[in-house]
Image: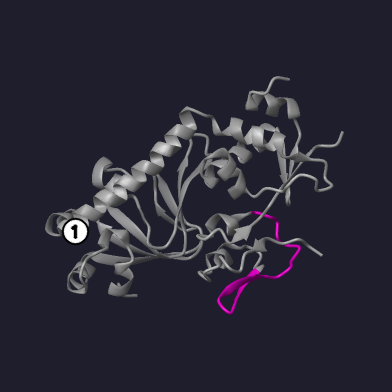
């Protein structure tokens, strides 16, 4: 199972900007709300989060120290 | 594709204007489409057109002498770009390219000047739009001059370092921006610079700190 960007359905206004910016077609509009399709192609580029006007998409990062 | 009066209504430059006036203003405006990645403006060229984004997203960016690109803003529907260049400087102060296929409305410099002269409401709107842009730039200046963003990002990375078993919250770039008191674009830029310097490595869902000492120094934390 591939973890994907998180969508806050309450915040999504269905504008579709994230769908158009996504290079791996991982996002689709269902009933005017963005829905994620799981794909290993998603490289966590965070462009969907960057263009979302309502902050409905989250691409969280874990911060770790490089192991020796 | 024709200019639609309905769409003009939601653009800040034309807010508060009656439909009859918008119908007249429509004659000054033209439609431009841009494919994904298509360049709309080149930095340094004569500033001839002010654009409004109708659909899509446009990235306004500057390119350094060594070819590095710096994103300044993302321009979303109903927002404008190239305002200052058209109204003041005469040259495009930055380049602009479509991040996704975009539909833009454009107005030529001469036409814009005539509209501002003939429609006082537009003149008031322009003042408001430019004031908001100044406000945004002042906060950018604050970021750049008073508190170096990279230093604050470094501090956040050190504070939120986990051991990979999830005891520390994961952070989005939006959240890092909120913590650092800056724009999300600044976080992306700072992380990119850190990656180029070899301080961190960006992986899918992970920011790996490769040089903790360098990060501490950047953050102004005593080692």
Percent across and percent down for residue A41 are 72, 62
Residue at left offset 70%, top offset 60%: A42
The answer to whether residue B208 is magenta is: no
Percent across and percent down for residue B17 are 21, 66
Residue at left offset 53%, top offset 71%: A14
Nearest the viewer among B59 and B160 is: B160
Residue B221 lies left or right of residue B11; in this view the side is right
* Residue under pointer 1: B121
Residue at left offset 35%, top offset 60%: B52
Residue B94 lies left or right of residue A22; in this view the side is left
Chain that bears disc 1: B
User: In which image quadrant can residue B51 be found?
Assistant: bottom left
For this orientation, the residue located farthest to the top is B222
Q: How many marks?
A: 1
Percent across and percent down for residue B71 are 50, 45
Q: Which residues are magenta?
A: A27-45
Nearest the viewer among B96 and A10 is: A10
Residue B125 lies left or right of residue B118; in this view the side is right
Residue B4 is at least partly visible in this image: no
In the image, residue B177 sits, relative to residue B105, either above or below, namely above
Quadrant of the snapshot with the C terminus of chain A: top right
In the image, residue A18 sits, relative to residue A64, either above or below, namely below
Nearest the viewer among B128 and B208 is: B128
The answer to whether residue A41 is magenta is: yes
For this orientation, the residue located farthest to the bottom is A31
For label 1, the SS is helix
């Amino acid at each position: 199972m591939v973890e994907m960007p998180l969508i806050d359905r309450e915040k999504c206004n269905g504008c579709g900007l994230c769908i158009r910016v996504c290079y791996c077609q991982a996002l689709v509009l269902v009933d005017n709300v963005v829905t994620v399709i799981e794909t290993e192609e998603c490289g966590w580029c965070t462009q969907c989060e960057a263009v979302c006007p309502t902050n409905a998409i989250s691409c969280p990062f874990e911060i770790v120290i490089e192991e020796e | 594709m024709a200019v639609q009066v309905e769409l003009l209504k939601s653009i800040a430059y034309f807010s508060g204007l009656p439909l009859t006036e918008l119908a007249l203003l429509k004659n000054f405006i033209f439609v431009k489409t841009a494919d994904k990645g298509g360049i709309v403006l080149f930095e340094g060229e004569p500033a001839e057109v002010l654009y409004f984004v109708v659909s899509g997203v446009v990235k306004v960016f500057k390119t350094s002498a060594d070819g590095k690109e710096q994103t300044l803003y993302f321009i979303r529907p109903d927002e404008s770009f190239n305002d200052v260049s058209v109204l003041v400087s005469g040259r495009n102060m930055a380049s602009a390219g479509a991040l996704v296929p975009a539909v833009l409305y454009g107005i030529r410099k001469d036409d814009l000047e005539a509209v501002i002269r003939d429609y006082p409401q537009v003149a008031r709107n322009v003042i408001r739009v430019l004031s908001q842009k100044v406000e945004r730039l002042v906060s950018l200046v604050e970021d750049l001059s008073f508190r170096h963003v990279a230093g604050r990002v470094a501090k956040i990375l050190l504070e939120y370092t986990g051991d990979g078993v999830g005891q520390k919250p994961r952070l989005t770039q939006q959240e890092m921006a909120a913590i650092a008191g800056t724009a999300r674009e600044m976080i992306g830029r700072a992380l990119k610079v850190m990656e180029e310097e070899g301080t961190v490595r960006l992986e899918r869902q992970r920011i790996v700190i490769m040089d903790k000492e360098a990060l501490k120094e950047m953050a102004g934390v005593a080692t």
